[in-house]
Image: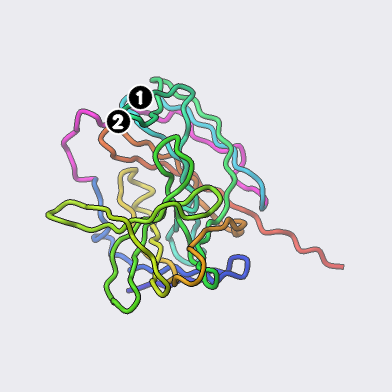
Amino acid sequence: MELVRTYIVNDWELKIAFNEPNNASVPSKSGQTLVAPGAAKYQINTLQLAADKISPGESLKLSAQISGENIAFLFTEIYFKDQEYDYYYGPLMQEHVRSAVEKEITGLVHPVWDSEINLSLEISPVIRVLTDGLNAAFAFMHPLEYAQEGCQLEGLFTKKDSGNANRARFKFDLDGEMIDKQIILEKRGRLMTHDLPIKSGDMFIPTVKVLTDFNLSNPKMHSLRGISGTLTKLEDPFHWVDEAALAGDYLIGLVIEDYNGDQYHHYLPFSIEANEVLTL
């Protein structure tokens, strides 16, 4: 059954829609038994927040102690909880954790992690919104390559009057302006990207990741896929803006990616308290 949720963020009406799963249909990697050479071998000794309740505009302070090997990248990410159903939507934010030691390989910067990693991070929750100048949708972004400034967003792109939707990926700078746009096509079992011209009347629907309780109990569990609202190319290019995070319950996650590209997600709950309304 399709579930459609609507949220009001600073007068924007933002939607999320996805098909609710049966428990048996939630995709998982948990049945794998083979361990590839680059698989992460790690232990999280400490993962904690200085406070699990914050006021609007305040930052989270996350600390972690990790020991292990084959750790390629670390990320933080935030999801917000549906107040009526046991689902979490996002990622509102996902960012690389920078290492004090880095190296360049074939023109790309990579982190160098010790076998003992100590993190002390400060994260300010926000909601990123993509707009066409008239309507808006959730923009649940992912970072660009490590040490590159900017973010990227995937979704479904439909040319005006075509009726055919294809995967697309937009890249943005930190000011919210689009810097690259690619269509993603499958050819002979491989995904290929091509430059995507966008014209007036073309439509884009950002994708949404949905977590369930199964994700929280299995660090390698795949998330579900959903969509946000439909945007239409008008006079100005699509661009994103940051809005204040809503009051409610959230998850902050530490993501460990190994040399095989597999990711392991570990979450802590926190909440943003509602502003007090003063009465005279």
191, 22: nearer the viewer: 191
User: Residue most toward the left?
Assistant: 188
Q: Which colour scheme is used?
A: rainbow
Q: Residue 192: in sight, yes or no?
A: yes
Q: How many marks?
A: 2
Label 2 SS = loop
Which amino acid is tagged 1?
Gly
x%, y% of residue 184? Answer: 27, 57
Label 1 to label 2, Cα distance in Å?
Answer: 7 Å
212, 202: nearer the viewer: 202
Q: Residue at x 48, y 66 (%)?
A: 137
Q: Which residue is drawn at 29% across and 39% down?
A: 262
Which amino acid is tagged 2?
Ala
Q: Is 272 in the magenta?
A: no
x%, y% of residue 12? Answer: 57, 69
Left or right: 230 as drawn, with respect to 134:
left
Span highlighted in magenta in the image: 30-55
Residue indicated by mark 2:
40
Q: Residue 14 carries which label?
A: none
x%, y% of residue 78? Answer: 49, 49
Q: On the rendered image, what quadrant is the N terminus found in?
A: bottom left
Quadrant of residue 278 in the image?
Answer: bottom right
